[in-house]
Structure formats: structure tokens, C-alpha cells
Image: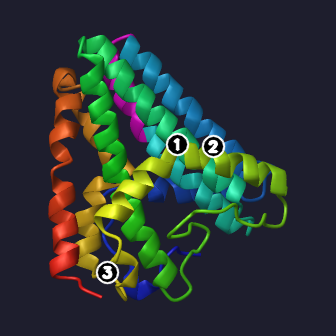
Amino acid sequence: MSKLHASDKFLDLSDYGRSFGRFFALQLKETRFTPIHVTLLFGLSGLLALYSIWNQSYIAAAFFIVLKSGIDAADGELARLKKTPSYVGRYLDSIFDIVLNFLFLMMICYVSKTPFWVALLAFIGLQLQGTLYNYYYVILRNKSVGGDTTSKIFEYKTPKALPGETQKAVAILFGLYTICYGAFDKIIHTLDPEAYKVKTFPNWFMTLLSVYGLGFQLLIIALMLPLGWIDYIAPFFIGYSSLLFILIGIRKTVLKP
């Protein structure tokens, strides 16, 4: 099951791990492994990447970062294969992502002796970039015929638990998700409050937008580390945030409701 109708599919530059994720999920389809187990596994890959950065083993770090992206794609694929969508898995996945993003940048700046405030600005920029991508992508998924609607455009209240999960677990993880992402969501919604009124987004725009997807962001980090550019990673993501206003400007001027 795809997240989008065939007519809405686009070249997602951040989704290079999808083929591996689908292959990995197929191997687990008939096993007792659940999507939550896969989410925990990509968290482990992220921790191994952190250790490798701390140890200045940058090729290993790049490998585990890219592997994390591939495994990250597998939990959702496995949920669709087993027909067990869950809010618990969706929120846990997102919480792991933001925690690992923060730790990646903190570790990179610690090793490169970059000031903390630069690392913090880079993290804020990284998250705003990813939030813009998710905002427009979720709008497209919700409007696409037969598209995935587990993620909502505006997540202001705890959703009703799906079969196989408890309402308490959903409420706890939704609360943590809101703490982690609420401020970033509000900033992006404030910058473009009318985006949800657009009927659809053309494929070329979504492909351009995908340079802000988490997979592409992590790929940039994975490439810069072995090249010896660790000192420039945090400044790069601060400057990379300028593209936010270009993408929002295109949406407002070209892709009007």
C-alpha cells in the first residue's frame, strides 16, 4: 500500500532508503517482529552512528546514518504489509527522529569544537526544514485519493487509538510528540497558514521540497563527515534554512488555492 495515489507520486530525494526498507520489511512479514521492533532497531543504528562520530570514525558514522534511514523506512512498510497501522508507532518514530537529530548535531559540534549556540541554531534550522517538508507532504497525502491518513495536517488533539494499541499509550506518546514538535509546527503553520487549502501539489514542487526531507538531510551529513567537513555541518544547516522562504514563496505565488 502506497502513501500516495499513483498520480501524486513524485521523485522523493529523501526517500532513497525505501527500496531497502521494503526489502527488509518483506523479510519480516511472516515473523513475530513488529514495526515497533524495527523502530527500536533504527534507534540503535543512530546510537552506533553517534558513537562512531565521537570516536571520529566518520566512514562508519556515515554507514550507520544511511543505514538508519533505510531501517527508518522499514517500520512503516512493515505496518502496511501486516495491515497494523498505529499511532504509537507513528509517534515513537517521530520522537526517535528528533532526539537523534539533536544528538547528531550536539555530537558533531562537540567533536568539532563548534559553539553550543551554533549547534542549537543548526538543530532549529534542521527541524524547521523537516517540518516544512512534512507539512506539505502530509497535506498531499491527506488529499490524495486513497492516500495514507495516519498523519494529520493539524495535530492538536490526541487521536483515537487504532486496533491493537491502547489509548493510554497513544495519549502519552502524543503528549511527547507535541512537546518535541509543537513549536516547530506552529512556526511553519504561521508562515503558511493557507497551504492546506491547495487542491494538490505538483510533482516538480514536491521533488524540490524533498531536499528538506530527513533522509536527504542525513545524507548530507553522511557525505560531509568522511570528506572531513565536520566543522561546516552546523553552519551549512543554518544557511540551508534560507531555502524555507523560497519554497514558501513558490507555494504562495505559484501554487495558490
Dot 1 crowding, Cα within 10 Å, few <14, some 14–19, many 20+: some
Whether 226 is drawn above or below 182: the answer is: above
Whether 232 is drawn above or below 255: the answer is: above
Amino acid residing under circle 1: Cys
Residues shaded magenta: 55-66
**Main secondary structure along the magenta-highlighted residues:** helix
- In reply to whether residue 60 is colored magenta, the answer given is yes
Q: CA gap, disc 2 to disc 3?
A: 30 Å
Amino acid residing under circle 2: Leu
Q: CA gap, disc 1 to disc 3?
A: 27 Å
- Mark 2, secondary structure of its residue: helix
In the picture of the structure, the residue carrying the numbered disc 2 is 176
Whether 211 is drawn above or below 149: the answer is: above
Q: Nearer the viewer, mark 1 or mark 3?
A: 1
In the picture of the structure, the residue carrying the numbered disc 1 is 180
Q: Position of residue 196 (x, y in %)?
A: 40, 78
Q: CA gap, disc 2 to disc 1?
A: 6 Å
Q: Is residue 94 among what the camera can see?
A: yes
| Residue at x 46%, y 59% (from the top left corner) | 19
Q: Nearer the viewer, residue 31 or 187?
A: 187
- In reply to whether residue 151 is colored magenta, the answer given is no
Say whether residue 20 is left or right of residue 247: right
Question: Contact, CB < 8 Å: mark 1 with mark 3?
Answer: no
